[in-house]
Image (tube, rainbow, N blue to C red):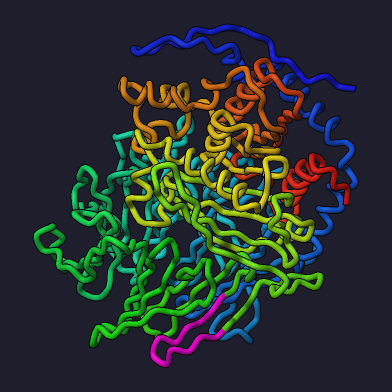
Amino acid sequence: MYQPPIAAVKPRELTSPFGTRIDNYYWLNEPENQEVIDYITAENAYFEEQMAPTKALQEKLFQEIKGRIREQDESVPYRRNGYYYYTRYEEGGEYPIYCRKQGSLSAPEQVLLNANEMGQGESYFDIGDFEVSDNNELLAYSTDTVSRRLYTLRFRNLQTGELYPEEIQNISGEAVWAADNQTVFYTKKDVDTLLPFQVYRHTLGTDPTQDVLVYEELDNTFYTGVGRSKSRDYIFLNMSSTMSSETRYLRADRPTEEPQVFLAREEDHLYEVEHFEDHFYILSNAGAPNFRLLKTPVNNTAKAQWQEVILHRPDVFLENMELFREYLVLGERKEGLLQLRIIRWQDSQEHYLNFGEPTYTAGISINPEFDTTVLRYGYTSLTTPHSTFDYDMTTRTKTLLKEQAVLGGFNREDYVTERLYAPALDGTRIPVSIVYKKGFRQDGQAPLLQYAYGSYGLSMDATFSVARLSLLNRGFAYAICHIRGGQELGRQWYEDGKKLKKINTFTDFTDCSRFLIDQRYTSPKTLFAMGGSAGGLLMGAVVNLHPEYYKGIIAAVPFVDVVTTMLDDTIPLTTGEYDEWGNPNQQEYYHYMLSYSPYDQVKAQAYPNMLVTTGLHDSQVQYFEPAKWVAKLRTLKTDNNLLLLHTDMEAGHGGASGRFKSIHDTARQYAFMLLLLGIEV
């Protein structure tokens, strides 16, 4: 039998202006070092040995989940510039096939990209983006074969099938055509920090080394991107940090002109721009924490010219917008739930769509055309598979175009969903979305998987999962905790879970755990918690705070070495994170981060059973953070519970690519929990 791998102790002093720490495992930050690879390989071998009793169960779970997925499938087509675009999957295919038809859905199919053929022989493959030129004849697309999110841009003639010779390396993924069908704008990344910071202009058929630098971002706390307005009249350069943004713009039919500043960046001012007829429309949080909608003439973008269209409301978060010729559609959040608000330009008459479930997710889908009264939107809930609707805003009738097929006899009426509110220690009510199968006993004995994220203002809404049925059908409940640090209850919900209030994120989660135990949905002997990336930081923090609440923890690609990472501006994406976590080069933030950083706060105590996963090529949370964390836990924890580290040697932050390869990851996680519960089938 394998013994748990023990990483060599090689003390290293990490000195900052506010203190010196000793890191015994800093040496694991050397992927080219064979000793590092040997250690990770030993951890993988230990994982396989400990999980060996679940091999048959993992295969069963894989086949079970895969068996619910319709292998030959197709997305709902959307119309753009005279063509219908859609994605389809073939039986046995891991990757999508991107297609279009001209004029009508009965026209012959044209395959734009077949990712199955393109990814053949690659251990990882991803298509980042594809864009068709205004004359419908040229295709720009990007691919990644490493999972570092450094994409390569290529071009294809859709009439002849010819692949142009130029390849542009290390872009962020997106590409935007100008109106001349020859010029393409793209964003270049720094290959070390992975920060997108330059916008270039390329002319099709020319040497990429001669591309023109249009803009370079000198502030390394900002991310840079490029896009095109829905009207297709403007190209936007978007620079954004967590708390500030700036847009520059130029006419799409004048691609060589210098981009104009829409509004120079201001501290604590986030805004985004869209174009419609004679005005730009602006979502802005200036004097409006939950955002408001304004407009300004296209020939004068000075702030003094901005006119209010939708007022700020303290109880409603204005999340996004969609502009049509006759209607304005707003995506709003109220009491943690998404709403779609329809307003007619002509007379300001408005109404909301009714979704009829206690917890759900609804959102504006792909709507590339102005001249239509039909809104395309998506809908899902914990019991409703992902669905695509067309809604006629004039007749107020909706048409279900497609509901995600779930094979194997799924019946949504077999499952129950609830919206609960857990009290936090400070009196705040934390929304909890929960689902379980009918017959579930609220007697404190049932297993429950608790999930949350709680960072960057990202809201974790209630959505359907085909894979999750494998847990629900085995008696699990599943709960999403909408904790502070997300934006479910508006901008203040996010502000109260970041920087010097970050601890709220962690205590909200443990307060939800306590509530679910007290309400007898589960018990410490059957409660599991899961989070990934910044949600993995959450897992690291809660096991230090309240390890006694949990039977097991799954921490996926966890951001756990907060202080060391945030002090190292050579690590990918670090500087862009200061507005989220704070800058530890300032004393107040240094000590606050240190107080919750999971790696720094590991101590001699009993920990739950833990499964930690990472990817060797992870570009967002480097593999060595979870590796170091596990190594330190092994030396300090006082229990005999399982501690497993699984490193995907071929993947990055998002795990394995492909529809079915990724199911193996899920099967491993589920088998880990079922093993601990003694459930063998």
Which residue is drawn at the image coordinates 58% and 64% (left, top)?
A: 418
Residues rendered magenta in the picture: 388-399
Magenta-colored segment: predominant secondary structure: strand
Indicate yes or no whether the magenta region holds residue 390.
Answer: yes
Which residue is drawn at the image coordinates 44% and 87% (left, top)?
A: 392
Which residue is drawn at the image coordinates 28% and 85% (left, top)?
A: 349
Res. 116 in view: no
Indicate yes or no whether the magenta region holds residue 424.
Answer: no
Q: Quadrant of residue 677?
A: top right
In the image, is residue 627 above or below residue 115? above
Which residue is drawn at the image coordinates 51% and 43% (left, top)?
A: 511
Res. 331 in view: yes
Q: Quadrant of residue 407?
A: bottom right
* Front residue of 212 and 32: 32
Residue 471's x, y, as percent? Answer: 74, 55
Q: Quadrant of residue 364?
A: bottom left
In the image, is residue 298 above or below residue 349? above
In the image, is residue 227 above or below residue 498? below
Residue 137's x, y, as percent? Answer: 50, 69
Residue 516's x, y, as percent? Answer: 60, 50
Residue 365's x, y, as percent? Answer: 48, 70
**Relative to 576, 344 lies left or right:** left
